[in-house]
Image (cartoon, rainbow, N blue to C red):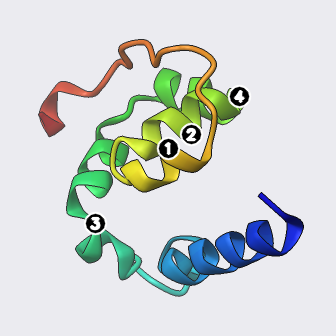
Amino acid sequence: MKLAEHQQRLDSLLAAFQPLWHAQPFHETRPAWCAAWPALTADLLALDDDAETLLAADDVLATEFVTRHFPDLGASGRRSRPLPPLPVVARYR
């Protein structure tokens, strides 16, 4: 894939997922993307502190977690290892 094609793909992805990366912390009680992607919202709210720490420290695991909800993103990335089961808080299940 040529550089121009990569740039176009990146531009398309950034535009498509702007609600995720352009949320306004401290200005929105709940970002609008929560309504657009309720399954992602539920999975994120279900993470316990250990799982959050694990995902924050490991880009590969974080990418795998997100691509569960956006399979098309996984097609553009490389997976180097499977995502282990993540601990969740029981009350959100």
Q: Which one is earlier in the sequence, the residue at label 4 or at label 1?
A: 4
User: At which x and y percent is residue 6?
Assistant: 76, 66
Is 21 rendered above or below residue 39? Answer: below
Please state, as top left, top right, bottom left or bottom right, where the N terminus lies in the image: bottom right
Mark 4 or 2: in front is 2
**On the picture, is 93 further left or further right than 12?**
left
Q: Dot 3 surroundings within 10 Å: few (below 14), some, or many (20 or more)? A: few
Mark 2 neighbour density, 10 Å: few (under 14) some (14–19) many (20 or more): some
Q: Position of residue 42 (x, y in %)?
A: 24, 50
What's the residue at 29%, 38% (across, down)? 46
- Label 1: state its secondary structure: helix
Spatial separation of the CA atoms under disc 4 and disc 2: 11 Å
Alpha carbons under labels 4 and 3: distance apart: 24 Å
- Mark with earlier residue (2, 3): 3
Rendered residue at 49%/79% (across/down): 16
Is 63 positioned to the left or the right of 33 in the image? Answer: right
